Image (spheres, rainbow, N blue to C red):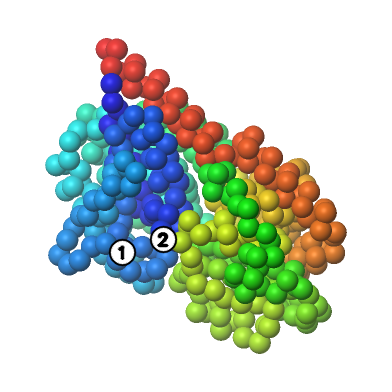
Amino acid sequence: MTHKIWIINQFANTLDVPGHIRQYELGQFLVKQGCQVNVFASDYNLTQRQYLKLKFPQLWHRETLNGLQWNWLYAAAYQANNWRRYLNMLSFCLTLLIIGLFKPKPDLIIGSSPQLLAAFTAWILAKLRRARFYLEVRDLWPQVLIELGGKSPNSLMVRVLARIEHLLYQKSDRVIVLAAGLVDYITKHGAIQVNWLPNGPDVEQFKLEIPVEVAKADYHIDPERICLMYTGAHGTANSLDTIVEAARLLHQSHPQIFQILLVGDGPEKSQLIEQASGIECLEFRPAIPKGEMPQLLKAADGLILTLKDIPLFHYGVSPNKLYDAYAAGKPVIVAVGGTVNQEVEKYRLGFTAAPEDAKGLAEAMRQLAQIPLSERQAMGQRGQDLIRSTYSRTKVAAKLWQLIQEDLCVRISY
C-alpha cells in the first residue's frame, strides 16, 4: 500500500537555493520507498528575502522534483525581525490551512518547527484529515524567544506558545528531536514517543574528485593562506560579531596568515560589515545554493561555528553546517559550548573556544594554523568517520522510514 505523507516546514528549501534541505532529502528518500510525499514550504525565502516562484496574487505553486511534490506557499514578506515577521508566520499558516483542506487526504503529517505556529497548524490539519501526526523539533520554542529574544516568560505571547508547545508534545503520535539533549526535556513535558533523528548531510554529495588547489582557485582563495569559513545565516543567534573580533585580533598579530570568509546573508550582515571595517583578512561573500556547498567547503582549511552564549544552545542544537564540515573532511573550530564543544573535543575534530569569547576563538584559529597539514587531514577523516557512523542523512532517513512503517502498518491492521 502506498503511504501518503505530508512534510511541513515553512523554511524548507530545495537544492537550488540557500538554506537547509533536510525536508527535501527526507522527502526524496521516502519517494524512493514508494511513498507519495508532499512538502509544504514558504515561497518567501528567508535568506534571500524574496519570492522564488509566486507571482501576485498566487497563493500556491507546485512543482515535481524527481517524484517529490513540492508546494510553495504564500507568506507575507518581511525584512527585519519586527511585527512583519509575525505577519509572515501567520500568513503562512493561513495559506497552509486553506491549501491543506482541499488536497487529497494524507496518512501522516510531519510538522516541523522552528515555526511553532506552522507545526500547530499542521497538527490541526492532521486532526481534520484524520491522519497521524509527527512533531519535528528543530528549535525549542518558546524557550529560544526567552533566552535569545529577551521575551518575558510571563508575556502573553510566550504563555500562549508554551501552551501550544505542551499540547503538541502530548498529542503527537511521535516527537522527533534533532538534538539528543532535547529527549529528556520533551519527555518530561508529556511526550509519549520521542525519537532522536539528528541533522546530517547526504554523504554522496561530498564525494568530490576536485583537488583542493582547483577548488581554491575556483573560489578565489589564496593558497598561501589558511582559509577559515563560516557558512550560513547572519543573524543574532549566530554570534558572528565574535568571529569579526577574533579576525581583528588575527589581523593585528598575523596579518598575512589567514583568509577568513563569512558566506551567507541575514539581518545582521550590514552591521557586521560595518563592524569589520579595516580588517583585511576578513571577507563577506553572498549566500550560495545548498547544492554548491560541498564544492565551496572543499576549498577551506577549516570551518567555523559560533552561537550566542545561552543555556539552550548548550544542549538543544543540531547544526547542519557543523555536519557539512565533518562530511567535507575539514577540521572545525567551534565556539558553542555544551554538547557541540564536547563532541569536537571527544573525537578530536578540531579546536574549541567558549561562546562569545573572541580571544579564545582567535587562539583556536592560531592553533589550527600551527598544526601540520597531516594532522588537519586526520581531524577531517575522523569527522567523516563520525558522519558515516551517526549523522549520515541516509541513516537518519532509514530510521524515519522504519518508524513510519511501524505506525502506519499498525493503523492499517485495525
Q: Quadrant of the N terminus?
A: top left
Asked whether 374 or 361 is in front, the reply is 374
Q: Which residue is mark 2?
A: 17
- Residue 269 lies, with reference to residue 165, above or below; the image says below
- Residue 264 lies, with reference to residue 70, above or below; the image says below
Q: Which residue is mark 1?
A: 52
Drawn side of residue 384 relative to residue 310, left or right: right
Which quadrant holds residue 85?
bottom left
| Residue drawn at 57 percent across, 59 percent down | 295
The amino acid on which the numbered mark 1 sits, given as a three-letter code, is Leu
- Residue 197 lies, with reference to residue 337, above or below; the image says above
Drawn side of residue 64 relative to residue 11, left or right: left
Q: Position of residue 340 (x, y in %)?
A: 66, 48
Say if residue 102 shows up in the picture.
yes
Q: Callout 2 environment at 10 Å: few (<14), some (14 to 19), or many (20+)?
A: some
- As measured in the structure, the alpha-carbon distance from the residue carrying label 2 to the one carrying label 1 is 9 Å
